[in-house]
Image (tube, rainbow, N blue to C red):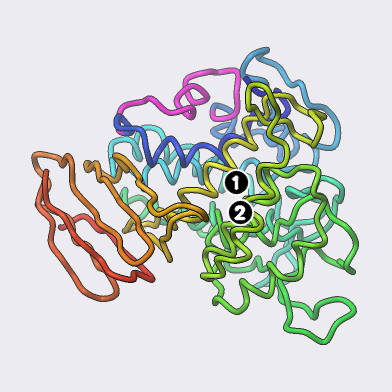
Amino acid sequence: SFCDNHCTSLQRLTADSIFSFHKLVNARTSNLDFLFASPRCSITVARSVALSAVKSSALIFLSPWAGYATTYGWAELFEHHIAGDVALAHWNRFRATGNLSLLESEVADVLEGVADFWVSRATKVNESSYRILAAIGPDEWHCKNDTAYTVGVAVQSLRAAITAFALLQRTPKPAWSAVASGLDVPLVAQPGTAKAPVHQAYSGYAGEAIMQSGVADLGYPLMWPMNASQRAADLGYYWNKVSGFIAGMVWPAIAIGYNEVNDTANAALFFAWSYSTLQQPYLVYSEEPGGAGCPNFITAAGGVLQAVWAGWGGVRLRDDSLDLVYPTPPPGSTQLVLKKLAYQQWLLDVTIEVTSVRVVAVAGADTAGGLIVNCNDKVTHVQPTGGLVDCTHPTLLRIMVKP
């Protein structure tokens, strides 16, 4: 169970765990299927493109249990990033399966509805520039213009809609590209320092305390384009601006970011901090230390799970590949095993050790020609069931379906 007002936190922090490790990912078995099938929750509403911006975003907060909104006020009116979270959860579902029928019948409509929402929500500045005004990101303490995560998730969900329509040989709406290219998360000088610039948390940010760092979430899960030094600068600046109270959503994101730039010392530190709201005797997470906030806070559990497989495992779903970025075992471990990692029509056992990674195809689709595994620019073709690849000191291991 989980608190109703965190219903769609599942999309941002737990959905990918199900896509990546559920052996029936092509069947309708994920938590999104529950939301999709239920007329009482968010996915149905994402298709309601005729609704006004405020109404369509507000209905995303419908409770899956009660069938009506249980979060009122600022969340419905301003925390609009959740629309993008829902869209990208569906897009990752397609990325994980490669199922064009699923894209056509279920995913594309959601992407279209959310893309239209962002067009209605964006404010045009000039012919090439847009802004998103008065929005709340994961940092729920501040309603500001140009919040980093809101802008980032808007752009990425718009781009997903454009790509999906191209795959389905449909014509994307011109406004989607205009808004996606006109939104940006600017780099600004670190307030009060002469250090390298960082992505701006929101317009006018001056170094004040924040609840969560939407900037930390740009790299993962949004995979916002930036180099490693920029990613490290963002993490180094924002980690000590955030509250530690919502540990399960804050510290896993920071840990994953440090794994992404191969800074395992800081990754280990923040990974350990991620367990600070784990409660005895049943080892369930609360939202805040000491059991405060939401009890049995599944969002925190999802965050910690992602810190394992997306952080130490380095797993990334992309449009045309499944990547492992700087995979290495967690601290105190000699091995991290990802059993039956589901990608397209394949199930893979991935064994990650300190100096090597082994990928074994334990099941593959009858019609699949094989997989292409690229490890440090060495390419290996793997056939269904039993094929394996050994990779030494991988910085990037990329898995693609053979055409």
Residue found farthest to the top:
66
The kind of secondary structure element at disc 2 is: helix
Q: Report the side of 255 relative to 355 (left or right).
A: right
Please tell me how many numbered marks the rendered image carries.
Answer: 2
Q: Earlier in the sequence, mark 1 or mark 2?
A: 1
Quadrant for residue 342, please give it.
top left
Disc 1 vs disc 2: Cβ atoms closer than 8 Å? yes
Q: Which region shows up in magenta?
A: 26-43
When the figure is inspected, residue 356 is found, relative to residue 93, above or below; the finding is: below
Gap in angstroms between the C-alphas marked 1 and 2: 5 Å
Quadrant for residue 208, please give it.
bottom right
Q: Which residue is mark 2?
A: 153
Quadrant assignment for the C terminus: bottom left
Q: Which residue is mark 1?
A: 84
Q: Is the residue marked by circle 2 packed among few (<14), some (14-19), or many (20+) residues within 10 Å? A: many
Magenta region includes residue 265: no
Q: At x 38% / y 63%, what residue is drawn?
A: 354
